[in-house]
Image (cartoon, rainbow, N blue to C red):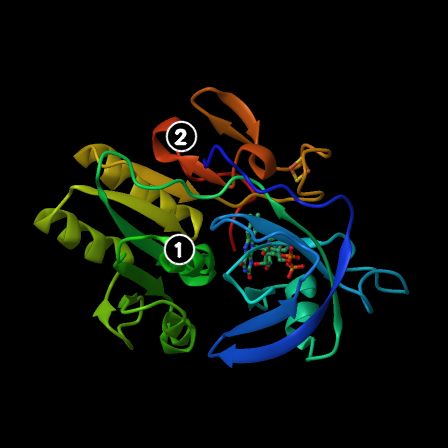
Amino acid sequence: MSEDRVTAPFGRRSALVTARERHGSYVVLRCSDAAGPRPQAGQFYMLSSATRWGGGDRERPFLPRAFSVLRAEHEELHFLIEDVGPGTKRLCELQPGDELLLVGPLGAGFAPPRGGRAPLLVGGGVGIAPLAIWQDELSTPAPALLGFRDAAHAAGAVLLAGPQVATDDGSVGHHGLVTDLMSERLDGDDHVEVYACGPPAMLEAVRELCALRDVPAQLALESGMACGFGACFGCVVPTRHGLIRLCLEGPVLDAADLETAVVAGAGH
Ligand SMILES: Cc1cc2nc3c(=O)[nH]c(=O)nc-3n(C[C@H](O)[C@H](O)[C@H](O)COP(=O)(O)OP(=O)(O)OC[C@H]3O[C@@H](n4cnc5c(N)ncnc54)[C@H](O)[C@@H]3O)c2cc1C
Ligand code: FES
């Protein structure tokens, strides 16, 4: 959605893992990327490990996988990863000193709030990742409303400042959906611009609530991505203005451009 995007250097480069931290169900991988430009919040990278990625009898994972940048500081990139399949499993196994291969930063990230509105961050599960770097970069304090399945996932909430948390099972914070917290917030003050990332059903609920209340929103979507830079057309999603490649025109889209945030093949 941001007009001025940071573009990736040509080709895939190598980055050494400098740290691996566990936060409940999630792993945060840090890697040094002195050769790459500083990414914008909402941009993403295609990641793979230099070893045990494709080849051999069992080829999966084969293609690199897409990950939002969680944080960028001191020439280091941080990524938040949940082990949900062969690619994320392999990345979660990496240890300091191991080699990561990356392409990025890719796509268009978040744009500043319009019309003097205050930012409001709404995240679900691993979708909290692009909101952490956006909270770091915004010039005004941005409250964060974060929803998780359970306590093990809610451990990821420490990655943002001062979050209000909801869990599906009520083990931490509000027992219910993060959109319950969002509705309450908007009842108090709706001169905000919402920034959201999470599973498709959550994003759709955010989109509907914002449309009803005439609140602008920027949604970071997911779709299956094979290349990440516009070559494969694997990431095409429908908008009110036709089909777009999410890796080029997104992953952050203006909610007003979407009929629905539920995209076939997206989310886990
Ligand atoms: C722009 C963008 C940013 C992203 N940022 C992050 C991030 O910050 N952190 C993060 O963890 N992920 C992120 N993702 C999601 C991540 O890229 C995908 O989940 C990726 O596909 C995981 O790869 P995998 O090999 O581990 O799992 P995959 O094999 O690709 O499977 C992914 C999900 O699909 C399910 N699945 C796989 N095969 C099938 C099948 N045949 N039928 C039904 N379900 C199936 C799996 O159970 C799993 O839930 C992002 C995606 C995009 C597009
Ligand atoms: S991921 Fe290949 S065109 Fe978007």
Q: Which residue was labeled with disc 2?
A: 258
Q: Secondary structure at mark 2?
A: loop
* Residue holding disc 1: 137
State left or right for residue 36 relative to residue 253: right
Residue 171 drawn at (x, y percent): 29, 77
Asked if the residue under mark 1 is in contact with the one under mark 2, i.e. CB atoms within 8 Å, the reply is no
Specify the amino acid type for callout 1: Glu
- Quadrant holding the N terminus: top left
Q: Residue furthest top?
A: 241
Name the image quarter holding residue 216: top left
The count of marks equals 2
In the depicted structure, whether residue 221 falls above or below residue 93: above
The amino acid on which the numbered mark 2 sits, given as a three-letter code, is Leu
Mark in the foreground, 2 or 1:
1
Q: Which of the 4 quarters of the picture holds residue 31?
A: bottom right
Image quarter for ligand 1: bottom right
Few, some or many residues within 10 Å of mark 2 (<14, 14–19, 20+): some
- Residue 167, quarter of picture: bottom left
105 lies above or below 126: above
Q: Residue furthest right?
A: 56
Is residue 42 toward the left or the right of residue 158 in the image? right
Please tell me which residue is depicted at 67% across the width and 32% down the height of the picture: 233
N-terminal of the pair, mark 2 or mark 1, is: 1
Provide residue 115's location: percent of width, then percent of height: 23, 34
What residue appears at the point 27 percent right and 51 percent down from the top-left corner?
120
Badge 1 density bin: few <14, some 14–19, many ≥20, Cα 10 Å: some
Q: Which mark is residue 219?
A: none
Question: What is the C-alpha distance between the residues marked 2 and 1?
Answer: 26 Å
